[in-house]
Image (cartoon, helix red, strand yellow):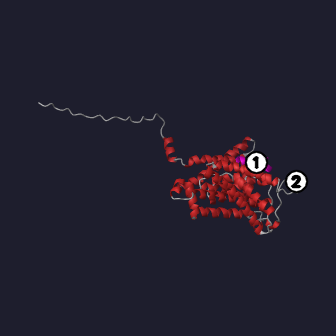
Amino acid sequence: MRSVLTEIALPVGALLAALLLFGGFVWLGGTSPVDVWTLLFKGAFGDWFSFQNTLQRAAPLMLTALCVAIPARAGLIVIGGEGALVLGALGTATAFALLPLPANIVGTAIVCLTGIVFGALWVMLAGALRQYRGINETISSLLLAYVAVGIFKHVVEGPLRDPASLNKPSTLSLPDGMLIHGMFGSDVHWGLAIGLIACVVLGLWLVLTTGGFSVRVVGGNPKTAQLVGLPANRLILMACGLGGGCAGLAGSIEVVAVHTNANASLIAGYGYAGILVSFIARHQPLAVIPVAILFGGFGAAGSLLQRRLDLPDASVLVFQGLAFVLILASEALRELDAKALWNKLARPAGPEAPPPEATTPVAVTTPVKEAA
């Protein structure tokens, strides 16, 4: 019970501390922190329009957070979700441009599957570099994300560019029959349902299946995994493929549900925000859902801060950065023994008694009477 409370209290405390620091940051600029906190809530959950915007932003965050969470359960820290997302979007646009696809749900499924494959292969590359060449996966996945963004821009502005897109280079727009529309007449597209299903399915897979248990063993104790003969390399590549596929699917959904084509607006930082969501959720897929909704709300409130308080839209990124730093710092408190710390602080000040010196036992000799 205590460990569960600790798991919840530390990230919540870090978020509250980040809100306080962010309030101090805007206060230095002459803005009331109370007004900022109020607008953050109103812009995220104040009315139905705001809540729909929050849910729209939460959908890609769920999938990019899984790109971090699933490899993390296998012992890897992968932060290249942004690269997998843009390549997933690029794969969707490429499949539409090169394949004769029907303008219906079948065509939608094919282009989304292409995006999943592109994202999975890209993150699996980082896992393979770690397992077979010993290259740190955190650094390689981050660098590969920059490479992916460069490839995306080159292809979108070059070979796949729509000649009609003059001021904003983009690929050909998908027909209406291939687009994903809102759920039940709302502005929230079905990508949110896909994100929810992915979180639930992968969360149950980690807990209830042999494959998920094997991945957790590899991530928790690699030596034990070797002793019992688990195929660590294959399991790690599978975890990277699942995570990368989720981020690639996020890119595909952004194309078929929001932008209708691949363009530079897709590079919106969802992959990097997913890192923060995953760490706050402690890499638990089910916990990713509420955290993604919360941070989707913070992202949605950025424009409201700009309109009402004349703050830059990117000021929300300052809050996200503070939250990420404090979440990482809170890891140092996770293993802290609070009782031992309190006893140490409550101990009266004064010189400590020196440790007792080791004494060498002295042999006691009994005098021997001389013989008469």
State which region is magenta: 306-319
Marks 1 and 2 in Cβ contact (< 8 Å)? no
The residue carrying mark 2 is: 166
The amino acid type, in three-letter code, at marker 1 is: Ala
Closer to the camera: disc 1 or disc 2?
2
Residue that appears at 70% across and 46% down: 23
Q: Main secondary structure of the magenta part?
A: helix
Magenta highlight on residue 310: yes
Between 332 and 225, the residue placed more toward the observer is 225
Query: Residue 64: horizontal and vertical position, in percent?
Result: 69, 56
Between 144 and 173, the residue placed more toward the observer is 144
Query: Residue 320: horizontal and vertical position, in percent?
Result: 69, 49
Q: Quadrant of the C terminus?
A: top left
Between 90 and 350, the residue placed more toward the observer is 90
- Looking at the image, residue 36 lies above or below residue 242: above
In the displayed structure image, the side of residue 166 where residue 357 appears, left or right:
left
Magenta highlight on residue 182: no
Determine the secondary structure under disc 1. Answer: loop
Q: Quadrant of residue 42?
A: bottom right
Between 169 and 128, the residue placed more toward the observer is 128
Q: Can residue 47 be seen by looking at this rendering?
A: no
Query: Residue 104: horizontal and vertical position, in percent?
Result: 79, 69
The residue carrying mark 1 is: 314
In the displayed structure image, the side of residue 275 where residue 102 appears, left or right:
right
The amino acid type, in three-letter code, at marker 2 is: Leu
**Quick one: label 1, few (<14), some, or many (20+) residues within 10 Å?**
few
Determine the secondary structure under disc 2. Answer: loop
Q: Quadrant of residue 169?
A: bottom right
Query: Residue 233: horizontal and vertical position, in percent?
Result: 59, 56
Residue that appears at 77% across and 57% down: 90
Q: Can residue 81 be seen by looking at this rendering?
A: yes
Name the mark on residue 113: none
